[in-house]
Structures are given as structure tokens and as C-alpha cells.
Image (cartoon, rainbow, N blue to C red):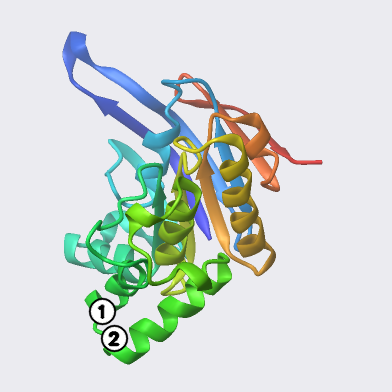
Amino acid sequence: MIEVQNLTKTYGSGELEVKVLRSIDLKIDSGEFVAVTGPSGAGKSTLLYQLSLLDEPSSGEVFLDSIKTSELSQVQKTAMRLNMLGYVFQDYALLPELTALENVALLMLMQGHSREAAYKQAEGALARVGLSDRMHNLPSQLSGGQQQRVSIARAIAHHPTILFADEPTANLDSTNGHVVMQAFLDLHKNGQTIVMITHEDDYAKYAQRVINLKDGQIIEDSKVA
């Protein structure tokens, strides 16, 4: 599902050049739940941004579902992000004036779905993360854990091929963090491919595979017992 060949990301130039990723080679199969861990500054989020087409590598190749992404135009990459990929971030990124249902339906409306179809898919996605009874609440009426589950519902409502999550529990207490991780686990059990960045070992254990980064390189790649 994801293949990376000799991926490098460098910021700056000359004496100010900083190599954030160093010759990364990586394969992630369809249906895998992969956690990427490592200390601050290891390159975790930078790697996710390259894999999810939110940034472009300095060199190397990223293949998504056998598609060589370096050969895509910006319009094609935008279409892939909109239709094939799902994103969950630590700050939820919900529109405060919209209900949970409206926040989730918005992406499908942008894709050109009818209002009826978009809202039906949104209702189903909210049900999958256990929020059927909160769909008409505004974000301000939801706990942090509930808001993050709304953002997960928004990310999966269009049935993305790959779901990317960047520190999805960073702003949550332990209880809400584990609730959100259970939502990811349930999605994985239903075949969703997930790549998640986390600095918390307790949350990484929910994944089936853990990739540990340090100084922009993979230092360990192991299956979770």
C-alpha cells in the first residue's frame, strides 16, 4: 500500500542545511496499523507529511497504492488527498460553528456528493466511533476525546484507502486517549490501513507494528507482541 525508496528531506542549504530524514526505505502493507515513534526531532511528523502528500521529499520516491507520486501533478495530488487519504491531527481542526454531523459531512460535500448522501455517510462514520448520540452537538459541547473522535469520523467517512494520524492523543488525558486509540483499533480490525505518529509507548502498543525513528533514520521496525 505504501512503499518508500531512499527518502530524504532536507531543510535549508549550505551551513544551515538540516537533514530531517536520511535515506528512508519502508514498506507498509494494506490493512496494517503502523505506529511511528521516536524522540522529539526524530523526523516522525516529517515522515508522515511525505507519505501523506502534505509535503514533498528532497529526494527519493513515495508510492501509494502502486502510484509513483513524484509523477503526479499538483492537481492530481490534491485529488488523491481528497479522495484516497484521510487525516487526523492533534488539534482536531473542527469548524466551531458546525455540528459534529456537519463537520463530518463537509468533506463529502466538497467531493461533490449530494447533501443526502453526504449526511448519510457522516452519520455512519459517527456511529463507527460511538458518537451517534452527539452528532447534533457543536464542538464546544463535546469533550476533547469526543472532538477527536469527530475528526476521526470526518477522516474515514469517505472510506479512505489510507488513514494518517499525527499525534492524535497529544491534547487528551489518559482516559480519552485510550478511548480514541480503541476507535483506531476498531477501524484496523475492519481492514483500515493506518499510519500513526505517537511519542507515547502505551498508545503505540495498540498498533500491530512499531517503527522507531532517531535522527531521521529507522533504528527499529518490529511487530507488536
Point out residue 106 in the picture as x, y percentages from the top left corner. Answer: 27, 72
Spot the residue most to the front.
Answer: 141
Q: Is residue 14 left or right of residue 49?
A: left
Crowding at dot 2, Cα within 10 Å, few <14 / some 14-19 / many 20+, comes out as some
Q: Quadrant of residue 141?
A: bottom left
Residue 113, labelled with which disc? 2
| Quarter that holds the C terminus | top right
Determine crowd level at label 1: few under 14, some 14-19, many 20+ residues with C-alpha closer than 10 A: some
Spot occupied by residue 35 in the image (x, y as percentages of width and height): 59, 41
Residue for point 18% across, 60% down: 74
Query: Residue at 50% of width from left, 55% of height from top?
Result: 2
**Kind of residue indicated by mark 1:** Leu
Quadrant of the rendered structure where residue 139 is? bottom left
Q: Residue at x 52, y 67 (%)?
A: 131
Disc 2, disc 1: CB below 8 Å?
yes
Asked where in the image residue 209 lies, by quadrant, the reply is: top right
**Residue receiving disc 1:** 109
Mark 2 element type: loop
Q: Is residue 130 above or below residue 219?
A: below
Secondary structure, mark 1, is: helix
At x 30%, y 40%, the residue is 57
Q: 18 left or right of 211?
A: left
Q: Is residue 160 visible?
A: no
